[in-house]
Amino acid sequence: MKARVHVTLKPGVLDPQGKAIEHALGTLGFTGVEGVRQGKVIELDLAETNPAQARKNLHDMCEKLLANTVIENYAIELDGQSAP
Amino acid sequence: MKARVHVTLKPGVLDPQGKAIEHALGTLGFTGVEGVRQGKVIELDLAETNPAQARKNLHDMCEKLLANTVIENYAIELDGQSAP
């Protein structure tokens, strides 16, 4: 089963990478870019075939390793379906 | 208009970050993880309101700055709609 986890900085947390991209886009002549935030996407191949159990495992993985929940949010997508 | 760009390593390109995550998940006791790849997600706020023009601009941004097209693929999502 394929899963995808998006890890993004919480609103209000400073994102220097995003600011750097925004600035670089401006210098390249792209106008009308009003904000950029950069996050991570982690794609996993899981042996688990039960979607409910897979989602539970992914939730645990995010809490323990994939995301720093003090400053980051995460969203889990299983086979193209986002979390309910 | 909100847009999201996924930048992922092409298949076959070595992904040490993904391997590190896979290994760390194993040591934390998560079994059944058969593969991990890490990519980037870039969220942009655009002033452009025409979806076709916005998609064209995003395509140019990816080719020029956001992705290294030698080793990376990109996918553009506009307001939750992925590319056709």
Image: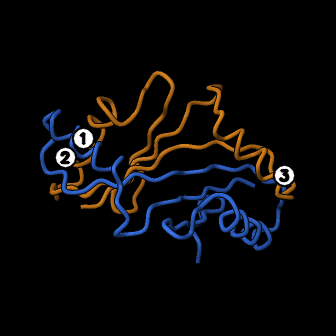
Chain colours: A orange, B blue
Find the distance from the CA under tag 2 to the CA under tag 3.
47 Å
Q: Residues within 10 Å of mark 1 (few under 14, many from 20)?
A: few
Q: Which chain contains the residue that carries disc 2?
A: A
Q: Residues within 10 Å of mark 3 (few under 14, many from 20)?
A: few
**Which residue: 19% across, 56% down?**
B34
Establish if A15 lies above or below B18.
above
**Picture disc at residue A56:** 1
In this view, the mark in front (1 or 3): 3
Residue A18, by quadrant, is top right
Amino acid at pointer 3: Thr
- Counting residues from the start of the chain, the first of labels 1 and 3 encountered is 3
State whether discs 1 and 3 lie on one chain: yes
Amino acid at pointer 1: Lys
Percent of width and height locating residue B80:
59, 59
Q: Quick check: marks 1 and 2 in contact, CB under 8 Å?
A: yes
Residue A14, by quadrant, is top right
Classify residue A26 as left or right of residue B37: right
Mark 1 lies on a secondary structure that is helix
State whether discs 1 and 2 lie on one chain: yes
Q: Which chain contains the residue that carries disc 3?
A: A
Amino acid at pointer 2: Gln
